[in-house]
Image (spheres, rainbow, N blue to C red):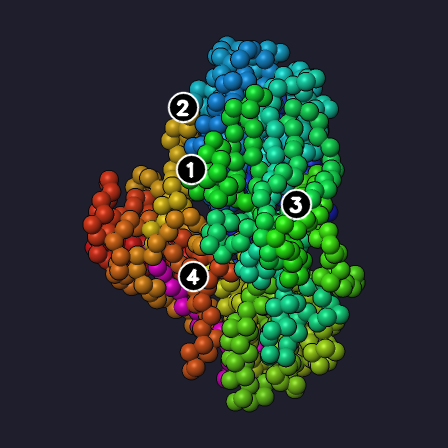
């Protein structure tokens, strides 16, 4: 896939880029009915002001395309009648969870059964967040809407509300493919923009919706239901789903602890660098929120410290409250430290309580075999993890713990303490004027003594050769900025900080005294300039160019996104001294052939879904498996350790190298990979090993056995059997030839393969 993703901008900035005289701007909302977008791109409505009321006016939108390799942005115009498969938004949709959701047969079946049980008479059904229109078609079929019925009529009608224009365009294709375009009225608006008597003739009798994320509330479920009950639904409507219940459980886990507590993990480090001194204990942290995660992948490392407990119920059939609190007393089932609360939800789809779907981890589903959603791995809904601050809450067996839970419109939060004591010891000191928020993976990286040792040893080896007067930190690395001044008191660090910007620089200022460096040692550069000026370095050359590489906000993108490090090195080529050292000096693209049955199934091309043909969505949604030749699916960013069942079928093999000592250029590589195990090959996993010091062979790997990084996955259109395994429509093979081509102008990496 391309290196383009979509970046949210404020409305003020968007409007400043659009001629105001001819356009009417529709402001964005804090949530989107177009679910499973990561994140949804900003769409600016470009309907001419004088024609706003005209049904025939063509919808146009600007969509911001952001190239993460170069940092450049451009506006793309999206017309209502464009072919969605040709739009840049098609690339964005290919990286969402839509395809995985539509491949979830248990979810689809549960919704079908509940809709057929609820929609039993001619009425008005409203589908909010309609997506491809699957639920709308289920409702129309259950009601028996005739071809001659007007979709906007008072009886026997279905209205599909979808706010995201590219998805609306895709939905129209699906409806047309299934002969449903005249049975369902499609409205390209947010539901809180709908008006009875204008957009829809009457209030709806039945609401069907699937605007749920892993946390349940994150896609705006509560404000959507509130507005629907106030303005769009009849009194006492029927709904599918009927109710959702959030459950939780206390767990102990060293891995989850290291994802958020840099302070206590850094204390163990002997390198003398303190990113979180005591006086700033609460200032560098992860965002206080729930994090979605496949907790089944951690089951062998998790100690359960309580029985499951109910937290909140959200009823779809009545208007929910924006804010609720719950005070619970939970008995510890064992001694240990509560490092996190793992939560999930159970969906009751029908009023009688006979149809359910659950996102619970497998250790719960094994005890509740009647709950759907546990038969196979899926990625669109996971469990959620709430980190307990610091080292966690120490508990003894049978001890009562007081849990305070609260939910807002869009999130759930927790606070807990033992009844025998308060948690004052772990409460954070905090300077309100300085705060830096990093991802859990980055917090854990900075907590890793081996990672810190590798970075510091490399810098020491470089600095022992000579004093570097000017050093360039190419990314958002607070650690490297401090490490340079810690190891060389005469160096000056030029900081790019393209994501952290002034917040990162202010945090460095707060660390100056404890880490014994001067603020004069740093200069924050303007990352928006095409070229850094020689005057930034007092007309002197840069002797050392360093990076982790790590870019703020790039944690969910493909590994070669971080080749932006190479792009930045190329950008300041004229400022580098002839013998400048670059750290890392090389990027090694590595590959492993793997069996990934769960991931492959979730990204398989679609055909029949509960009786409705969805084959027209495959290209746009990035289908990988069962594609007709010569089509191929996109490269996917994945955390392999969370991808369900897996097995490595080959060694880790070098595919190609990126030489950072030279300016960025297109390159390619090829290798033959032999299988070391028999099994079913579903695709290739690729990552970059960063060679920090070639002379001393210091390498930081980001491969599948390292949880803090995402890998790139290229899934096969058809699985291939290896050894004694047999699978339909496959060939038996002992090796595979893999070729990679990197295009430096776009940041794209293409993969070709041939089994032999």
Compute the Cα span from label 4 to label 2.
40 Å
Q: Is residue 682 above or below residue 663?
A: above
**Residue position for label 2:** 611
Q: Are marks 2 and 3 in contact (CB under 8 Å)?
A: no
**Residue 247 horizontal side relative to residue 678, left or right:** right
Numbered tag placed on residue 323 in the rendering: none
| Labels 3 and 1: the sequence-earlier one | 3
Compute the Cα span from label 2 to label 3.
45 Å
Q: Is residue 398 above or below residue 617?
A: below
Numbered tag placed on residue 375 in the rendering: 1
Assess disc 4: are there few (<14), some (14-19) or many (≥20) residues with their C-alpha within 10 Å of its C-alpha: few
**Span of residues in magenta:** 574-593
**Residue position for label 4:** 705
Task: Verify whether residue 575 appears in magenta.
Answer: yes
Q: Is residue 299 visible?
A: yes
| Labels 4 and 2: the sequence-earlier one | 2
Single out the mark in the foreground, 2 or 3: 3
**Residue 672 horizontal side relative to residue 544, left or right:** left
Assess disc 1: are there few (<14), some (14-19) or many (≥20) residues with their C-alpha within 10 Å of its C-alpha: few
Q: Quadrant of residue 242?
A: top right
**Residue position for label 3:** 330
Q: Is residue 187 visible?
A: no
Q: Secondary structure at mark 3?
A: strand
Q: Quadrant of residue 70?
A: bottom right
- x, y percentage for residue 513? 74, 78
Q: Main secondary structure of the magenta part?
A: strand
Q: Are marks 4 and 1 in contact (CB under 8 Å)?
A: no
| Labels 4 and 3: the sequence-earlier one | 3
Residue located farthest toward the front when viewing the structure as drawn: 398
């Amino acid at each position: 896939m391309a290196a383009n993703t979509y970046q949210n901008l404020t409305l003020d900035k968007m409007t400043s880029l659009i001629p105001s005289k001819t356009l009417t701007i529709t402001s964005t909302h804090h949530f989107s009915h177009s679910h499973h977008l990561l994140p949804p791109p900003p769409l600016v409505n470009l309907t001419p002001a004088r024609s706003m009321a005209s049904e025939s006016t063509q919808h146009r939108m600007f969509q911001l395309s952001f190239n993460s390799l170069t940092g450049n942005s451009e506006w793309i115009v999206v017309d209502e009648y464009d072919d969605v498969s040709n739009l840049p938004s098609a690339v964005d949709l290919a990286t969402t969870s839509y395809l995985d959701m539509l491949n979830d047969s248990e979810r689809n079946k549960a919704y079908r059964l509940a809709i057929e049980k609820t929609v039993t008479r001619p009425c008005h059904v409203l589908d909010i967040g309609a997506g491809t229109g699957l639920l709308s078609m289920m409702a129309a079929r259950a009601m028996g809407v005739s071809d001659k019925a007007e979709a906007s009529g008072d009886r026997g009608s279905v209205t599909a509300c979808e706010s995201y224009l590219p998805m609306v365009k895709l939905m129209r294709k699906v409806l047309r493919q299934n002969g449903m375009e005249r049975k369902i009225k499609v409205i390209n608006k947010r539901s809180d923009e709908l008006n009875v008597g204008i957009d829809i003739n009457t209030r709806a009798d039945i609401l069907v919706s699937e605007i749920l994320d892993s946390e349940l509330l994150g896609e705006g479920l509560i404000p959507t239901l509130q507005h629907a009950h106030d303005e769009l639904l009849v009194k006492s409507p029927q709904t599918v789903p009927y109710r959702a219940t959030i459950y939780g459980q206390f767990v102990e886990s060293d891995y989850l602890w290291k994802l958020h507590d840099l302070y206590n993990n850094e204390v163990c480090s002997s390198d003398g660098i303190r990113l979180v001194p005591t006086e700033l204990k609460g200032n560098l942290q992860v965002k206080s929120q729930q994090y979605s995660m496949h907790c089944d992948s951690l089951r062998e490392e998790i100690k359960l410290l309580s029985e499951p407990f109910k937290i909140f119920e959200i009823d779809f059939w009545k208007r929910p409250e924006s804010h609720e609190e719950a005070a619970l007393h939970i008995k510890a089932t064992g001694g240990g430290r509560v490092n996190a609360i793992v939560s999930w939800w159970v969906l009751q789809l029908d009023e009688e309580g006979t149809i359910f779907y659950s996102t619970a981890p497998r250790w719960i589903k094994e005890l509740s075999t009647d709950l759907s959603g546990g038969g196979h791995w899926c990625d669109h809904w996971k469990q959620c993890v709430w980190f307990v601050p610091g080292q966690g809450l120490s508990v003894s067996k049978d001890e009562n713990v007081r849990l305070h839970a609260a939910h807002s419109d869009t999130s759930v939060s927790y606070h807990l303490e033992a009844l025998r004591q308060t948690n004052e010891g772990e409460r954070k000191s905090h300077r309100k004027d300085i705060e830096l928020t990093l991802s859990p993976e980055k917090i854990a990286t900075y907590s890793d003594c081996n990672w810190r040792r590798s970075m510091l040893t490399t810098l020491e080896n470089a600095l022992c050769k000579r004093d570097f007067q000017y050093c360039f930190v190419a990314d958002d690395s607070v650690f490297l900025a401090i490490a340079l001044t810690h190891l060389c008191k005469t160096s000056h660090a030029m900081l790019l900080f393209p994501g952290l910007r002034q917040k990162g620089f202010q945090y460095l200022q707060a660390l100056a005294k404890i880490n014994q460096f001067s603020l004069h040692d740093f200069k924050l550069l303007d990352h928006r300039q095409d070229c850094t000026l020689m005057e930034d370095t007092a007309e002197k050359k840069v002797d050392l160019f360093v990076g982790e590489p790590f870019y703020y906000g790039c944690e969910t993108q493909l590994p070669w996104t971080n080749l932006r490090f190479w792009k930045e090195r190329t950008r300041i080529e004229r400022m580098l001294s002839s013998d400048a050292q670059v750290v890392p000096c090389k990027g090694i693209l590595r590959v492993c052939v793997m069996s990934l049955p769960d991931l492959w199934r979730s990204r398989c091309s679609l055909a029949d879904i509960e009786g409705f043909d969805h084959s027209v969505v495959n290209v746009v949604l990035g289908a990988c498996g069962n594609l007709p030749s010569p089509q191929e699916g996109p490269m996917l960013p994945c955390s392999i350790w969370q991808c369900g069942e897996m097995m490595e079928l080959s060694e880790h093999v070098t595919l190609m190298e990126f030489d950072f000592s030279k300016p960025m250029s297109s390159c390619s590589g090829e290798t033959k990979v032999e299988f070391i195990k028999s099994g079913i090959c579903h695709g290739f996993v690729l990552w970059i090993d960063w060679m920090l010091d070639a002379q001393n062979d210091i390498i930081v790997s980001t491969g599948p056995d390292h949880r803090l990084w995402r890998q790139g996955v290229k899934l096969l259109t058809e699985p291939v059997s290896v050894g004694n395994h047999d699978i339909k429509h496959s060939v038996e093979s002992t090796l595979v030839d893999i070729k990679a081509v990197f295009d430096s102008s776009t940041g794209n990496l293409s993969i070709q393969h041939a089994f032999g």
